[in-house]
Image (cartoon, rainbow, N blue to C red):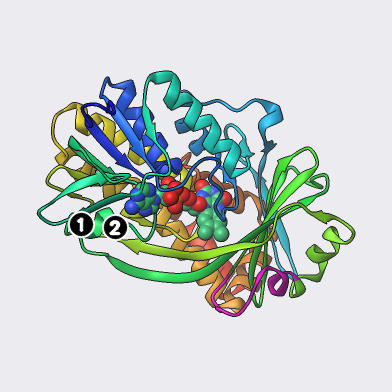
Amino acid sequence: MSLRSNTCDVLVVGGGPAGLAAAIALRQRGADVTVADALRPPIDKPCGEGLMPDSRRELAQLGVELEPSQGAEFQGILFADEQARVSATFPRGTGVGVRRPVLQQLLLERAAELGVRFRWQSPVTARKGVAVTVGGQRVTYRWMVGADGAASRVRAWAGLDPGTVRSRRFGFRAHFRRAPWSDFVEIHWGERGEAYVTPVGHDEVCVAGISRTSGVRLTGILEGLPGLQEKFCGAVRTTTERGTVTLTRRLRRVTCGNVALVGDASGSVDAITGEGLGLSFRQALLLADSVEAGELGMYEAGYAALRTLTERMARLMLLMDRFPALRRRALQAMSGRRELFGHLLAVHVGEQALPRFILRHGVEMGVLLIAPGAA
Ligand SMILES: Cc1cc2nc3c(=O)[nH]c(=O)nc-3n(C[C@H](O)[C@H](O)[C@H](O)COP(=O)(O)OP(=O)(O)OC[C@H]3O[C@@H](n4cnc5c(N)ncnc54)[C@H](O)[C@@H]3O)c2cc1C
């Protein structure tokens, strides 16, 4: 969109990870793309900052590969509670922890290299029947992509319903200057919520806390996890704590006319899954195919399938949060059957089909949960 003509093929509203990923994917297919954001980079946001191996591969499809110095790799996931711990490595590839502003800068540089145009500090406004403006200037476009986050205004302007909220929790994050003690993302389960630790550099870790209770903050969650809390004794906190709401939300539709939603604007999964960013990248790639084909039906039709697995895994983890006795039993059972946890992790990162897991291990899982002594 040149400042003179204020016209483009695709106007992307929101320059977060989802908006930038969509801009890159669309530009890779030749569209003339403008990204507009009310803020100016670097844009930070509360996030656990972990990219699973599958998310990393989709990021690579967008042409973004991380140098070792830009983050910290992790080999798998560890679950721990007051009684048990169990871990597994990813069946293929490694995950990476990367600070949000670093990820945004990498996406931004890739988008700029491809010729995406940017309008920073330019809020987009629209009302039914009134022209869309970017930073106060009228614009015309063929397609609009709403990548404006969980409280999406584009969603409302397009007349798309806000969807059904299936879970609502409170998430926080802070960073500590200390060497990662593990090359796993560690998820510690406690009575006040979960804390998960992602290595993001050779001397820095990101700690995210999620709770169902609104008054609880990261410090409160950590107080309920003394074994984890002591890891931060004497470590300098490098960022101030930031928090937000994390939702599992599903929309009936994610397109309307020439408008499509991506990222948290299009619905979200609870942060505990660590798949929010990966979902955005997958949506971006599908949306670009759809726009290239000249219609959004392909995106609408394929959208639900992209998030089904992550939604199911989110449901499982939310059950573990809601029912501590079930969680204790599950962790204890899996710590005695580590290969089961490995298979579950393989399902989570898309390396094993869920029906196959249920067929092969469903009965064993059921017995372990209902009558651990009998297994
Ligand atoms: C505590 C927590 C931990 C998480 N941990 C992980 C994790 O470890 N791994 C993972 O993959 N995901 C994680 N997530 C999820 C992930 O952070 C989100 O899915 C992701 O941030 C969504 O990005 P987005 O681009 O859709 O939205 P956002 O990052 O919210 O970006 C939206 C952008 O739109 C702009 N905007 C809004 N309105 C307008 C307007 N009218 N005009 C112009 N610009 C506008 C905003 O300024 C903003 O820059 C976590 C989330 C939480 C809350």
| Residue at screen point 54% across, 33% down | 105
Provide the residue span drawn in magenta: 211-222
Q: From the image, which quarter does the C terminus lie in?
A: bottom right
| Residue at screen point 21% across, 63% down | 161
Name the disc covering residue 153, or none. Answer: 2
Across and down, in percent, residue 28 comes to 33, 21
Is the shortest distance between ligand 1 and the CB of mark 2 under 8 Å? yes
- Is residue 308 visible in this depiction of the protein? no
Element under disc 2: helix
Where 239 sits versus 202, above or below?
below
Where 210 sits versus 200, above or below?
below
Q: Is residue 220 magenta?
A: yes
Where 23 sits versus 133, above or below?
above
Q: From the image, which quarter does the N terminus lie in?
A: top left
| Residue at screen point 74% across, 75% down | 224
Across and down, in percent, residue 352 comes to 46, 42
Q: Which residue is mark 1?
A: 157
| Residue at screen point 21% across, 33% down | 290
- Is residue 102 visible in this depiction of the protein? yes
Front position in the image: 227 or 237? 237
Front position in the image: 123 or 309? 123
Front position in the image: 308 or 9? 9
Q: CA distance from mark 1 to mark 2?
A: 6 Å
Report the amino acid beneath label 2. Arg
Q: Is residue 272 magenta?
A: no
